[in-house]
Image (spheres, grey):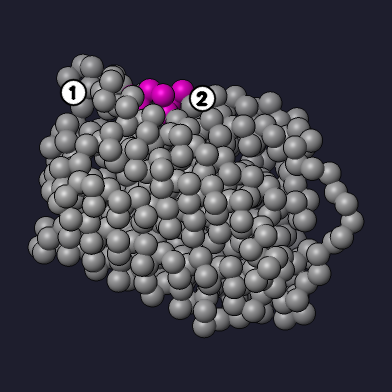
Amino acid sequence: MGGGRGPCRRSAARYGATLAPGACGGVGARRRGRVAAWGRGAGPSPGVRAGTATMWPMSDLMDSAVEPTAANAPRRSLWRHVDFMKIWLASTVSLMGSQVSQLAIPFIAAVILNSTVLEVALLGAVEMAPFILFALPAGAWLDRVRRRPVLIAGDLGRGMALLTIPIAYAAGHLTIWQLYAVGFVAGSLTVLFDVADQSYLPAILEREELIEGNAKLSLSQSSAQIVGPAFAGGFIALVGAPFAVIVDAISFFVSGGLISLIRKPEAKPERRLASDGSHTSMRQDIGEGLRYVLGNRYLRMIAGSTATANFGTSIAFSIFPIFVYRELGLSVALVGLVFGLGAFGLLLGALVAPGLSKRIGVGAAIVFSMFITGPATFLIFLMPAEAPVAATLLLVSVFLTGFSAVVYNVNQVSFRQAITPLAIQGRMNATMRFVVWGTLPVGSLVGGVLASILSVRATIGIGSAVAMTAFLWVLLSPVRSLREIPLGEASPSD
């Protein structure tokens, strides 16, 4: 299922943009509730809801596997893969619903509740905190259980959490603290959902189908973000932001129902045994996941690149609602329209990602797409008070960020999924999430503090400067020389 229901972020673009798919972290991100914001996922997974904003917002390989060869034998089209189509439809429905919350919840905090700059920034930090607190144990646990029931429970739980927002508002008791609580609960469930989501896709598809599958999931995200934001902006203006969140809650329920219809048997993972024949402990399993990722020269450089991009963009966009709604005076309808038009970048990225990796190589596609992130974010810093010019710059920024996030996540997530054995997929994804999304709450907190001391615009400039350095991790590493997705598993060390 890929990477970003969410956020992506997904990871993610924060407050209405698109998550670096996966994310984000998988590829698209079915939205991480409101989690993930302008960042890239470990890869955003089309099953996670990116929350506070959406801006896109981004195994091991032996030396002998650096130049793998792809199979030339004909294979079935995923259009005829019944279980994948259920996953794809679930992702599409959820992504459409997410567009409403991505605009509505930040608007509630910044405008309806009139929260301070630091309070708005803390909203993103609270939503992403569970990725620091729970990602590693979640990965170890999910390598011991079937993933599909976790996905269903995660969808239903997040839908119920979101429903408390319109209920509290109708009763006259909605506060920023309630938004914090919903964000933390949704974020915690998203940790489980997102890790299970990316670990489940390789159990449904063959290795040679992963790029196509992740690209199709990103296509859903792209389509949702083209149609969704404009609809969300108008719908929020019509019914009010708190009540508009109901649409997102319903989309979670529908998504969970569709996932429950998947019929392919999923074997329960066998407990690993220690050298003395006893079952390994959670601590040992977590340690193995950390060693697997950090001990591999490809995965650790991808993690460093994604973490840096997420840190910079989360600094910049932690206070994005304050900047566009209060300082620039843009309307929520205009912001929604701009994000909808800018999301054509996501669509373009989903369409060209497979062909681009074949033409220039998987590694070059990863480096190129990450390079675009920093300059695209810097365009937000340049937005003036004049609405037409501000909207134009925001449109270009959203377009470029979406394009780069999808290309990046389709390639790096597919690469990670292909080279990682199923037995350790959960821990690999959890470790990646811990590293790359762990920077998001830190960045949000830093952004809130900087904006309180300096200014909102200066904070955005600092964040974009940090994001501009993210591509150096993969440029100055063996990642850049990768040509194709390997079809065989490698050993867990370099």
Residue 54 appears in the picture as rendered: no
Say left or right for 16 vs 254: left
Q: Residues within 10 Å of mark 2 (few under 14, many from 20)?
A: many
Q: Nearer the viewer, residue 230 or 493?
A: 230
What range is drawn magenta here?
Answer: 244-250
Question: Is 249 one of the magenta-colored residues?
Answer: yes
Q: Which mark is residue 117?
A: none
| Residue annotated with mark 2 | 253
Q: Position of residue 48 (x, y in %)?
A: 50, 42
Evaluate if marks 2 and 1 touch, with contact meaning CB atoms under 8 Å apart: no
Going by the numbered disc 1, the residue's amino acid type is His
Going by the numbered disc 2, the residue's amino acid type is Phe
Q: CA distance from mark 2 to mark 1?
A: 25 Å
Q: Residues within 10 Å of mark 1 (few under 14, many from 20)?
A: few
Residue at x 32%, y 27% (from the top left corner) = 234
Up-down: is 287 above or below 334? Answer: below
Between discs 2 and 1, the one toward the N terminus: 1
